[in-house]
Image: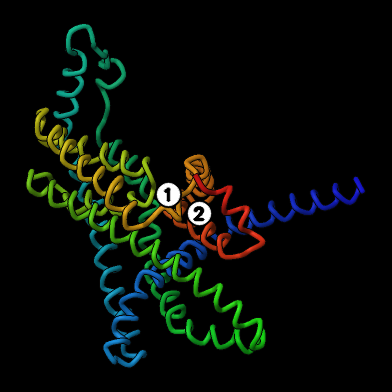
Amino acid sequence: MDEDRFFKASIAVVVLFVVGVVLKLARPVLIPFILAVFLSYIIDPALTFLTRCRCPRPGAVLIVLALMFVFLYLAGALVYSSGKSLAAELPRYQDRLGDLIRLLEKGVGPFKVHLSSALGKLDIEKIGAVILSAIGPFFELLGKLLLVFLFLVFIVSGRERAVTKVQKALGAGRAGRVRTAFEAINGQVRKYLVIKTVMSLVNGLEVWLVLTLFGVDFAALFGFLAFVLNFIPSIGSVIATVLRVGFAFFQFGTFWPPFWILVVTSGLDAILGNFIEPRIMGKGLGLSPLLVFFSLFFWGWLWGIPGMILSVPLTAVIKIVCQNVPALRPVAVLMGP
């Protein structure tokens, strides 16, 4: 009996190791594929709306895919051009860095920070290079938007045929139960991804609008970063806030504009994240905070920055699947808060 348990545990460890290796090696293909799957759920309401308006399904698919292609192209062009311009403009803020060092050394009362020895000779051009190298994996993902779009075309076009194939493969009785489970899973995944994307889009638009009103450079880039990082709970919004407020200080060189940017954008983020989104989303998809952080670090280690962005949606989808499979419902309970 003990040997049997040891054998099963050994097999489980080997399987987990093999799965991890496959996920690591297949990263160039899996990330665009998963992103395409998520996008297919996000555009599904638009596709359903067009078909209900008596638009033929092939025509509706073409319209939705064309709009998605335009969106992906504009998003890639915005991030790539704005990122290069930001790195090129960073040397212009060398004087601002000196002002920050002097402000911290002067301090307020007894609170002083001596940074001359550490930052006095800091080359801000190197900071630009570090920023570009840090967001390099994200630029790499944007460079694969064509692959994402191709996956999206096949997923959207073949979804109806997949249902028919399942019915033929399993027979009428089992196919009905499987289809009911699939419909429940698809509905909950669609609801989660659509609501999360809309809330992130609203967050990005409000950041872009506030920064534009304050005259901050690269407002569109920081709005897009707020949209993307909003998919990472807590940590993402903090990173986005630090980036835009820190850049505002370097641009203006004074305290009050960055302070008001911090107050306004953080207040709007709190309203969206703590009041509006929970009311729309409901409490059924709550995840354990410990699980969120674990998935964030795990997928970040496995796939880098794109993995961190996809980590929480992936974990939420896994929980939805577990909720709708009777044998896996205990796992869904453990994943809850």
Instruction: Classify 265 as above or below 175.
Output: above
| Residue that badge 2 annotates | 315
Counting residues from the start of the chain, the first of labels 2 and 1 encountered is: 1
Residue at horizontal 47 percent and vertical 41 percent from the top: 289
Is 233 on the left or on the right of 18, as rendered? left
In the rendered image, the residue lying farthest to the top is 110
Residue 35 sits in quarter: bottom left
Of residues 296 and 130, the one nearer the viewer is 296
Residue 175 is marked as none
- Nearest to viewer (mark 2 / mark 1): 2
Is 316 on the left or on the right of 241, as rendered? right
Residue at horizontal 14 percent and vertical 34 percent from the top: 258
- Indicate the amino acid at tag 1: Ile
Of residues 163 and 85, the one nearer the viewer is 163
Of residues 83 and 313, the one nearer the viewer is 313
Q: Position of residue 122 (x, y in %)?
A: 27, 26
Instruction: Classify 130 as above or below 185.
Output: above
Residue 305 is marked as 1
Characterize the local packing of mark 1: few (<14), some (14-19) or many (20 or more) Cα atoms within 10 angstroms: some
- Indicate the amino acid at tag 2: Thr
Residue 322 sits in quarter: bottom right
Res. 129 in view: no
Res. 239 in view: yes
Residue at horizontal 31 percent and vertical 86 percent from the top: 52
